[in-house]
Amino acid sequence: MSDLKERILQCAVDLYLDQGLKGLSMRHLAEMLDVSATALYRHYRNKEDLVHSIIGEAAKVFGNYLFAALAGKTAKERFDLAATAYLNFALEHSKYYEVIFMGPQQLGAECLPEELQDKSRATFQFLVDRVQECMEAGCLRKDEPFGVAMTIWAHSHGLIAIFLAGKWPIEEPNFRILFGESQKRLMHGLEDPKLRS
Amino acid sequence: MSDLKERILQCAVDLYLDQGLKGLSMRHLAEMLDVSATALYRHYRNKEDLVHSIIGEAAKVFGNYLFAALAGKTAKERFDLAATAYLNFALEHSKYYEVIFMGPQQLGAECLPEELQDKSRATFQFLVDRVQECMEAGCLRKDEPFGVAMTIWAHSHGLIAIFLAGKWPIEEPNFRILFGESQKRLMHGLEDPKLRS
DNA sequence: GTCTATAATCCGATAGAC
DNA sequence: GTCTATCGGATTATAGAC
């Protein structure tokens, strides 16, 4: 991988983060890199190729966050770490989060590369696994792991999506508190009743 | 309001529903209406004006769905009607839902008209009110109405957003079932414990 | 109010010289 | 691998005739 190729991707990411898809044009990109527009095509077949690379980069960073949760020593610890990692990724890389979870089709990528769809499924399966082992360990009420994972994911995604869309006039630290409180409300219905004090 | 102005808006909506923002061009729109492109500018100052009208139309339809829930005779009935109305709107007018709740900025509207932001706040307040009167009526556990409304909204929006993004390979009828089951999970943590059988 | 004609930009992508 | 020059197309929006 040549040096320029790396710089193109990094600059493309920045450009997208700044101005969205509309501002991400090959011409503009080349101008920022102080090279001619055609030079870009030596490293990326076309714009779609470049966009896919951006999505791939986002997915890579997300994976690094999420799978670090496997370092937890107990099922509950891994579950909690995964939840925190998801929130951290969303807040520390919000544009990447949007790219991955809030309609990548709006990024101009008509159909995602097969590899990313697999990764998406694998990510959800990761959550299902965390839920399932928590049920087996007795820290979550026994239920369908798939459905419960869906409920948990939807709740987290909903909070984050609404926050990132700017629909709540609060700052990040307050949102973190709010997120934790909301998750507690959700969990009170999911935890094993025998564990309730 | 001239006849053509109405037809333009309706056609613009259809065009956006069909092909998204990219397909919504003044030229294409004029072609479908069998008028010249310039004729459109007699009725809408520019494209942004037209886009704002589309958003306004979406908000109007949403309002019609939601506020019909006030016909319910009890607090719980109004609450349930509102939840169903929200889901129905999302599924029966999914593009409108996307326009309103999933990043209107992607529609090209840099900044929303002030009036719509007010409407957005009013809509959330509507939900807070439903939650509050349910708490007073004893069918929801006493808590902060704002926070509980947020939790409920986030969960619903999360499910819908993920479904509409095509991230679950299921059809609408199955999604409705899934939505109901997930909401039941959520509610088991929200309902007044005294009501549990 | 609607038309034709056109201005002024922007875009992705390619050919061919070096 | 990078450049200049350019093609072919799209877009919004305006000027002026009717």
Image: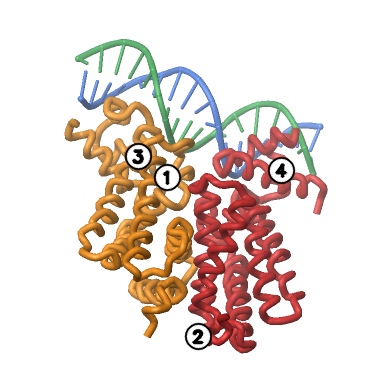
Chain colours: A red, B orange, C blue, D green
Residue at the image point whose x is 74% and y is 36% from the top: A33
In the rendered structure, which amino acid carries the disc numbered 4?
Answer: Cys
Q: Position of residue A97 (x, y in %)?
A: 60, 56
Image depth: mark 3 or mark 4 in front: 4
Image depth: mark 2 or mark 3 in front: 2
In the image, residue B173 sits, relative to residue A10, either above or below, namely: below
In the rendered structure, which amino acid carries the disc numbered 2?
Answer: Asp
Which residue is denoted by mark 4 in the rendering? A11
Q: What quarter of the picture does the N terminus of chain A occupy?
A: bottom right
Are the residues at dot 3 and dot 4 in contact (C-beta closer than 8 Å)?
A: no
Which residue is denoted by mark 3 in the rendering? B28
In the picture, the disc for residue B21 is 1
Are the residues at dot 2 and dot 3 in contact (C-beta closer than 8 Å)?
A: no
Q: Position of residue A167 (x, y in %)?
A: 48, 47
Image depth: mark 4 or mark 2 in front: 2
Q: Subunit of mark 2?
A: A
Q: Subunit of mark 1?
A: B
